[in-house]
């Protein structure tokens, strides 16, 4: 093998390794940002039956990370925060009545919110996924990014009931 090919292969392997490490570090940073659950949630319109159409404002030093974490933040918001009514929407209470349940069922929620885990089946970026220029705000050293998502709240509720996290709508009457 010529020395040029060897040098190229070493450089290529180094570049791949650096890229993998860089991506892993970015995901750890994204998860660290999300673990603080710093976000805002608002209704932007009426979704189809069984869904919410909401905008989630996420914070991060890198816009791309904030956009990806918005999906996780949206599900967390629907479960634990709810949102105020606006733009023709009615206020929505969180699915969970007991905020301490997040700590009490920490094993469940750690698995549920793991990277690419179960939460992903309940959320999608609305439209073509483009972020409006007015939804990218630079605040100090970080960005506040507004992402419009849809949340399959009926399926989410059903699965949380099946897991024993929340009680069914018909129980307790």
Image: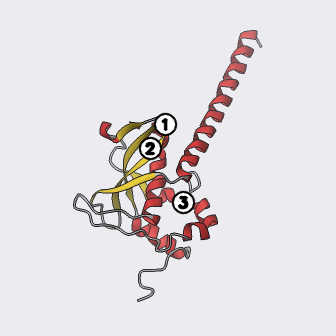
Residue at 66% over, 29% down: 18
Alpha carbon separation for disc pair 1 and 3 = 24 Å
Q: Residues within 10 Å of mark 1 (few under 14, many from 20)?
A: some
Q: Are marks 2 and 1 in contact (CB under 8 Å)?
A: no
Total number of numbered discs in the rendering = 3
Q: Give the residue at the far bottom of this rendering.
A: 173
Q: CA distance from mark 2 to mark 1?
A: 9 Å
Which-is-in-front pick, marks 1 and 3?
1
Can you name the residue that lies furthest to the top here? 3
Q: Earlier in the sequence, mark 2 or mark 1?
A: 1
- Are the residues tagged 1 and 3 within 8 Å (C-beta)? no
Assign a secondary structure to mark 1. Answer: loop
Q: Which mark is residue 67?
A: 2
**Residue at left offset 46%, top offset 65%:** 79
Determine which quarter of the picture holds residue 132: top left
In this image, 82 relative to 68: left or right? left
Label 3 secondary element: helix
Q: Which mark is residue 18?
A: none
Q: Residue 19: horizontal and vertical position, in percent?
A: 62, 31
The residue that mark 3 highlights is: 118
Precedes in sequence: disc 3 or disc 2: 2
Q: Nearer the viewer, mark 2 or mark 1?
A: 1
Q: Residues within 10 Å of mark 3 (few under 14, many from 20)?
A: some
* Secondary structure of the residue carrying numbered label 2: helix
Which of the image's four quarters has the C terminus?
Answer: bottom left
Residue 62, which numbered label? 1
Q: Is residue 6 above or below residue 65?
A: above
Q: Image height check: is 58 above or below 142? A: below
Look at the image and tell me in which quarter the N terminus lies. Answer: top right
Percent position of residue 71, x then y: 45, 52
């Amino acid at each position: 093998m010529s020395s040029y090919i060897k040098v190229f292969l070493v450089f290529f392997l180094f570049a791949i390794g650096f890229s993998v490490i860089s991506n892993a570090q970015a995901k750890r940073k994204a998860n660290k940002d999300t673990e603080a659950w710093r976000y805002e949630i608002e209704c932007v319109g009426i979704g189809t039956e069984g869904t919410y159409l909401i905008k989630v404002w996420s914070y991060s030093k890198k816009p791309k990370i904030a956009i990806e974490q918005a999906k996780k933040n949206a599900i967390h918001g629907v479960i634990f925060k709810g949102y105020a009514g606006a733009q023709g929407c009615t206020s929505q209470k969180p699915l969970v009545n007991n905020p301490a349940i997040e700590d009490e069922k920490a094993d469940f929620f750690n698995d549920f919110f793991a990277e690419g885990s179960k939460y992903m089946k309940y959320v999608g970026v609305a439209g073509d996924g483009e972020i409006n220029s007015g939804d990218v705000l630079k605040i100090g050293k970080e960005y506040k990014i507004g992402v419009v998502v849809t949340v399959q709240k009926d399926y989410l509720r059903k699965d949380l009931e099946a897991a024993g996290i929340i009680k069914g709508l018909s129980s307790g009457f």
